[in-house]
Amino acid sequence: NAGVTQTPKFQVLKTGQSMTLQCAQDMNHEYMSWYRQDPGMGLRLIHYSVGAGITDQGEVPNGYNVSRSTTEDFPLRLLSAAPSQTSVYFCASRPDGISGNTIYFGEGSWLTVV
Amino acid sequence: GDSVTQMEGPVTLSEEAFLTINCTYTATGYPSLFWYVQYPGEGLQLLLKATKADDKGSNKGFEATYRKETTSFHLEKGSVQVSDSAVYFCALRANTGNQFYFGTGTSLTVIP
């Protein structure tokens, strides 16, 4: 019963480096999203996808790129890492449709940019 | 736009004390309301939810009632335990659209 799986769990990057946070879900959910969590700011939506081939920007998309080639996978790319991107990143998925459907989170990826 | 406001923490309580974490929301229509819990080093997990006015969500001794007249969804527990120490997030999902909106989280520490 894997649910939402994120890798890596911890990563240290140097300023200017690029990397990809991987996210996969095995629940056949159409909707997937990436959030970042910062102290005192709660969860902020970076990008989301309502199905394979469809992505859109959330509240804080700058510096990040996403793609959705399959229903299962939704990677998040940091194009040129900056210290301001030091954060905890959560991938999430949920079924579409009924508003009462809950959202399922991965365990998080702790990213430090030095 | 839609939003959620929850009381700021951190909150520190003694074991067996009564807990209230306030949450109010702004939304058009009739959103669904949720409480999520995040234990240290983990992702968010659903704690409870309510999908219409006057519904009460409950789980693990926690309760919250959807109050449309006060646009609130306060989280309560009659007797907290050390194992309840975590960060609690209030959230809403609008009746239309795809987005969840989260509060900033309230950190709870329960001391023996």
Image: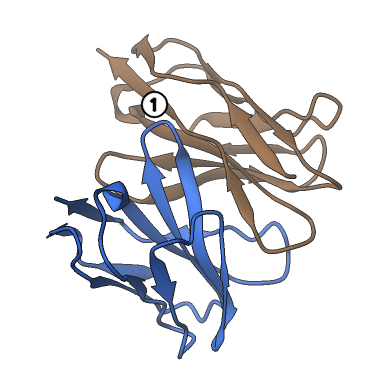
Chain colours: A blue, B brown
For this view, does B17 lie left or right of residue A98? left
Instruction: Tell me the residue at 32%/40% (across/down).
Output: B39
Question: Which residue is rendered at x = 43% and y = 40% of the image?
Answer: B37
Q: Quadrant of the C terminus of chain B?
A: top left
Q: Could you say where residue B61 lies in the image, as x and y percent from the top left? A: 50, 30
Q: Position of residue A43 (x, y in %)?
A: 47, 46
Seen from the viewer's position, the closer of residues A23 and B39 is A23
Q: Residues within 10 Å of mark 1 (few under 14, many from 20)?
A: many
Q: Secondary structure at mark 1?
A: strand
Q: In the figure, residue A34 lies in which quadrant?
A: bottom left
Residue B22 coordinates in the image, percent (x, y):
60, 22
Image height of A92 relative to B35, above or below: below
**Chain under disc 1:** B
- Is any part of residue B92 visible from this angle? yes
* Residue in view at x 47 percent, y 77 percent: A27
Return the residue at label 1: B107
What residue type is disc 1 on?
A: Ser
Would you place residue A61 above or below residue B1 in this image? below
The N terminus of chain B is located in which quarter?
top right
Q: Is residue A72 above or below residue B18?
A: below
Judged left or right of residue A114, residue A45 is: right
Which is more toward the observer, A106 or B103? Answer: B103
B27 relative to A101, above or below = above
Question: Toward the viewer: B16 or A60?
Answer: A60
Q: Quadrant of residue A65?
A: bottom left
